[in-house]
Image: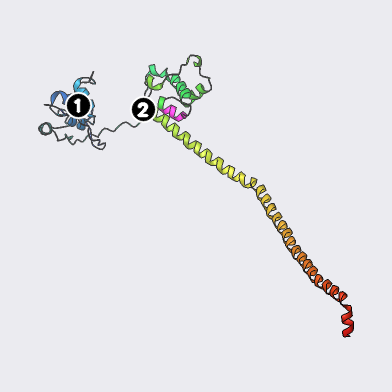
Amino acid sequence: MKRDISEKSADKSKATPLMPKATAVWLVDNTALTFAQIADFCDLHALVVQSIADGETVAGISGVDPVRNRQVSQQELERCIADPDARLTLMETALPTPQKRVRGPRYTPLVKRVAKPDAILWCLKSYPDLSDAQIIRLIGTTKSMINAIKNRSHWNMRNLQPRNPADLGLCTYSELQAAVEKAERVKVRVRAEKARIARIEAKRAGVSLEVEPETEQEQETEQKPESELEQEQETEQKPESELEQEQETEQKPESELEQALASNPPQASQQG
C-alpha cells in the first residue's frame, strides 16, 4: 500500500505515547498505516517517519508495541488501517501523562566543554554586540568565564583559538543567527534612544544658548524705533521746510507790491 507524505497538524495539547520514536518504528514495521497517521499519533513530523521507514534514523532503536503496552487497541488499529483519513487515539489510562522537559541548562559532553573558551572568544571577536546573557544561553557557560576571556586572565589564554560554536556543536546555526539578529535590534534601539536623549539635552542646552540671539533681536527691534523716530523727525522737518517755502512765496507777493508802489508814487499823491 502506497504511503503518502503530508505534514501533520500541530496539536500540542493532545497526549502522545510514552516512547514516540520506538512506537513509530513498530507501527512502520508491523502496520499499513500512512506516514501522516503515524506522525500524528506519535507527535512526529511526516519526514521523520519517512526517514524511519528508510532506515536512516532507527540505528539502535527497537520498536515498542503500543497494543501490548495498552496505549491503543487492536480495533483502533484496524479501523485506521481501513480508513487512511482516520487518526489513532490513545486509550484512557490512569497513568499520568508525560510532561515535556522544561528548557533548562543543557548538558554538554566533556569533549565539547574544552572547546567552550574557543567559542566564547569567537563570539566576542565576531559579534561584540552579543550580550553576556546571550553568550551564556548559546554556549552554556558562566559569567566568570566570559569575564576571564575578556580580561585575558584565562589560564589557557595563549592556546585559545576562536571557533564557531555552531561548528563545535554547542548550539545550532539558527540559534546563533537569532541571537545575532536580536543583538542588532537591541543595538539599533539603544542607538535611537541615545539619539533621542541627545536631542533632548541639546534642546535644553539650546534654550539657554538661544537667549543671546533673542536679546540681539530685541536690540534690533529696539533700534528700529529709533530709526523710525529719525524718519518721523525728517518727515516733521519736511513740513517746516514747506512752511518756509510758503513764507517765501508769501513774501514774494509783498515784495512785488512794494515794487509796484515804488514804481507808481505820483499817481497815489494826485489821488490824495
Q: Main secondary structure of the magenta part?
A: helix
Q: Residue furthest bottom?
A: 272
Q: In the image shown, does 244 or 51 lie closer to the viewer?
A: 244
Seen at 68% across and 49% down, the residue is 216
Seen at 80% across and 69% down, the residue is 247
Within 10 Å of the Cα at label 2, are there few (<14), some (14-19), or many (20+) other Cα atoms? Answer: few
Q: Quadrant of residue 139?
A: top left
Give the label on residue 34, or none. Answer: none
Give the label on residue 174, or none. Answer: 2
Q: Where 264 falls versus 19 (above or below)?
A: below
Seen at 44% across and 34% down, the residue is 185
Asked whether residue 28 is in view, the answer is yes
Type of amino acid under label 2: Ser
Q: Is residue 33 left or right of residue 110?
A: left
Q: Is residue 264 left or right of residue 10?
A: right
- Position in image of residue 173 (x %, y %): 37, 25
Range of residues picked out in magenta: 128-137
Which residue carries the number 1 mark? 24
Q: Quadrant of the N terminus?
A: top left
Q: Secondary structure at mark 2?
A: helix
Whether residue 192 is in magenta: the answer is no
- Position in image of residue 235 (x %, y %): 73, 62
Inter-mark Cα distance, 1 to 2: 28 Å
- Position in image of residue 56 (x %, y %): 23, 20
Q: Is residue 46 left or right of residue 118?
A: left
Q: In the image shown, does 116 or 98 lie closer to the viewer?
A: 116
Q: Secondary structure at mark 1?
A: helix
Q: In the image shown, does 243 or 182 lie closer to the viewer?
A: 243
Asked whether residue 19 is in view, the answer is no
Q: Pick whichever of labels 1 and 2 is earlier in the sequence.
A: 1
Type of amino acid under label 1: Ala
